[in-house]
Image: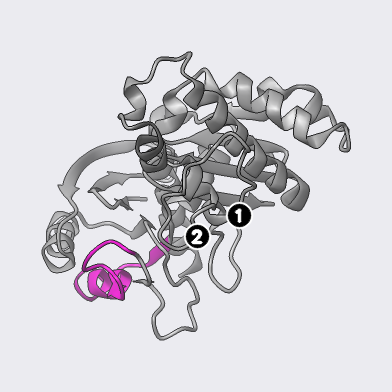
Amino acid sequence: MKLGVLEAGGTKMVCAIGDETGQIFEHTLIDTREPEATLQDIIAYFKDKEIDALGIGCFGPIDLDEASPTYGYITSTPKPGWADCDVVGTIQKEINVPIGFDTDVNSSVLGEVTFGQGKNRKCVVYLTVGTGIGAGICIEGALLHGMLHPEAGHIMLRQREDDTYGGKCPFHKNCMEGLASGPALEARWGVKPATLSKEHEAWDLEAYYIAQALTTYIMVLSPDLIILGGGVMKQEQLFPMIREYVKEMLSGYIKTRELEDMDSYIVPASLEEKQGIMGCLELARRAAEKN
């Protein structure tokens, strides 16, 4: 089966061709500009590829309700020009194939569950910590949807007493994204996070906030694997700090074999940072199967 992939990000669009086994045959990058020009470039790429289906993992929020008149739209995004943009409809008018559509983080968790370390797990949470913070959640092989999709990067956090930063999120200052995203790190410390030394106090505070969020996810979702990706998580010194804070915050209340081996429970992303692309392949395969 010849499958198309669109990993739609706020700064770049990754277009690729692959198959249901996870093989990627070719890919290209398209800068994310205004919607009309960007989508036309995407359509031009796929137009002559003779794909059987297309999988789209998209930045959001997005409308995933197939009964909704705005299904396939990016909805209330703060990205200029992209609010109320009909991504699926615009592409499908020109490329008449089944389209699987979901969030970028849901496509990442789907990639891990289908082709990576999330195989045979009952509940997997994939959290990306970067320019924004979001989570993809897969339960028994199904991506979690409800009235919308998880916005787990915007859960409220209890601010640590030694942190006086006001928060970066324009909607809720002390949500996880407001306190722990890359832009929040830069605003709090006045430099690009990547320039901070591994011993800088910033990372202890960052680990504290990430652990606080993970503790909430553990209590609510009971995942048997938590995967952390995104630019901030390239700071590998965060992982042992996060694991220790999670242990402390759980206070021994939950006892499972997963929590006894934190090194195998809270883990970095796998698949060489292609989990989003590979998840889109699975979105496309499922769309083709459904249709």
For the point 69% across and 52% down, the residue is 140
For the point 34% across and 59% down, the residue is 54
Foreground residue among 50 and 159: 159
Q: Position of residue 170 (x, y in %)?
A: 40, 60
Q: Position of residue 73 (x, y in %)?
A: 35, 73
Q: Would you identify the image quadrant in which residue 89 lies?
A: bottom left
Q: Residues within 10 Å of mark 2 (few under 14, many from 20)?
A: some
Magenta span of residues: 78-101
Q: How is the image coloured?
A: one colour
- Measure the alpha-carbon separation of dots 2 and 1: 8 Å
Q: Amino acid at mark 1?
A: Met
For the point 15% across and 63% down, the residue is 34
From this viewpoint, is residue 118 visible?
Answer: no
Task: Relative to 166, say whether 121 is above or below.
Answer: above
Q: Would you identify the image quadrant in which residue 234 lies?
A: top left
Q: Amino acid at mark 2?
A: His
Q: Would you identify the image quadrant in which residue 156 lies?
A: bottom right
Q: Position of residue 249 (x, y in %)?
A: 76, 35
Is 156 magenta? The answer is no
Left or right of residue 99: residue 85:
left
Q: Quadrant of the C terminus?
A: bottom left
From this viewpoint, is residue 64 visible?
Answer: yes
N-terminal-most mark, 2 or 1: 1
Contact, CB < 8 Å: mark 2 with mark 1? yes
Is 83 magenta? The answer is yes
Left or right of residue 159: residue 283:
left
Residue behind mark 1: 156
For the point 15% across and 60% down, the residue is 38
The secondary element bearing badge 2 is classed as loop
Which numbered tag is attached to residue 172?
A: 2
Q: Residues within 10 Å of mark 1 (few under 14, many from 20)?
A: some
Q: How many marks?
A: 2
